[in-house]
Amino acid sequence: MILHDLHVLGTIGSSHIHVEQGKIKFIADNRNAFDHLSGELHLELENAIAFPGMINSHEHLNFNLFPPLSNRVYNSYTEWGHDIHTHNSDIIKEVLKVPLHLRIQWGLYKNLLNGFTTVVNHGQKLDVNNELVTVFQNCFSLHSPAFEKNWKWKLNNPFALGKPFVMHIGEGTDDKTRHEIDRVIQWNIFRKKLVAVHGVSMNEKQAASFAGLVWCPASNFFLLGKTASVNKLKADTKIVFGTDSTLTATWNVWEHLRQARDSNMLTNDELIASLTSLPAGLWGLNDYGSIAEHKVSDIIVASSIKKNIFDLNPEDIILVLRKGEIMIADEKLFSLLSKKINTGNTFSKIRVGDQTKFILGDMPALMKECKKYFPGAYFPVSGI
């Protein structure tokens, strides 16, 4: 497959990309470079915006049927957890009636619709066998100092080697969560590779003890009215981006990104890097996170109508490739594709905003099945 006339984010002029066997084989600025290739599918994309499939560095895949739950601004995650289980237990029980595999599948679709092709899931290791999104679970996942039993032993287990430890740390604005960070640093006796999630109360000295910090601004502002000072922390640790889940933030990740941009704590380039090249390095996914020759062909193509990437919304995404395979295609593109190739895969027709898309799998059937268990489930898309 050859993608013609793309404006690749961070480059000047038009690019033409040859995708083959799940990799980016060749990139040229002159379409004549492909004249010798016969039998290839050519897609004319008319200077649409292209960027790497994004990496979501913090997600709870099975929590995306929840509505955002909070009753006030909290001082810490422990305060929030106690409050919603006291005052919102009915809705929590309703959502949990949906079988786990269905909730996970919707979580995968939520990420794919937003342009994520790789997701780092946090929590219990999930049995995920899917063709939608690459799910990274090659890490030791600890919930938090307050809610993870025996976390000190687990962190210092001498047999737990070779993978990073990921933990909610400093998720609050009170003294307790600030001191929590120091406790974790103190008890990381063997100096394991440690990635903090949230770090709202983290300072620069503490940041230097972590391989990375997953920044989840939308979730933080929603629960705590404040987020991590990544403008101060970025010199001491890698800042990567996470969405959490719809339990604490909107499903539309582009709203998260606009909120992050408007905070002025990262430059636009740094914010893009937090979704692509930096998490690829942090998680050891070195073939991901960039549009470059010989890299994995995870590519997002968005409408050229919106020239600024941060003005995008899910409906503006017209093509998603994961490992060179089509995951989402705009109606017009899919019409062309279906005439020229036989993927052997099943696609469903959906409506996202005011745009019609084709997406891999039977998403309408999934939504219908979820509603059997939880009639109040909200889905931001509809089947056609």
Image (spheres, helix red, strand yellow):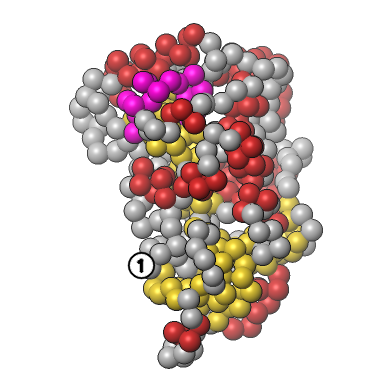
List the single residue furthest toward the front: 12
Q: Nearer the viewer, residue 86 or 262?
A: 262
Magenta region, residue range:
197-211
Quarter of the figure that contains the C terminus = bottom right
Residue indicated by mark 1:
294
- Residue 369, position as x, y percentages in the image: 69, 48
Amino acid found under the numbered disc labelled 1? His
For label 1, the SS is loop
Is residue 304 something one can see in this rendering? yes
User: Residue 299: x and y, percent?
Assistant: 51, 62
Please provide percent x and percent y for residue 183: 35, 13
Residue sitting at 68 percent across and 26 percent down? 69
Residue under the point 45% across and 14% down: 178
Prevailing SS of the magenta stretch: loop
Locate residue 72 relative to residue 162 in the image: left or right. Answer: right
Q: Neighbour class for label 1 at 10 Å: few (<14), some, many (≥20)?
A: some
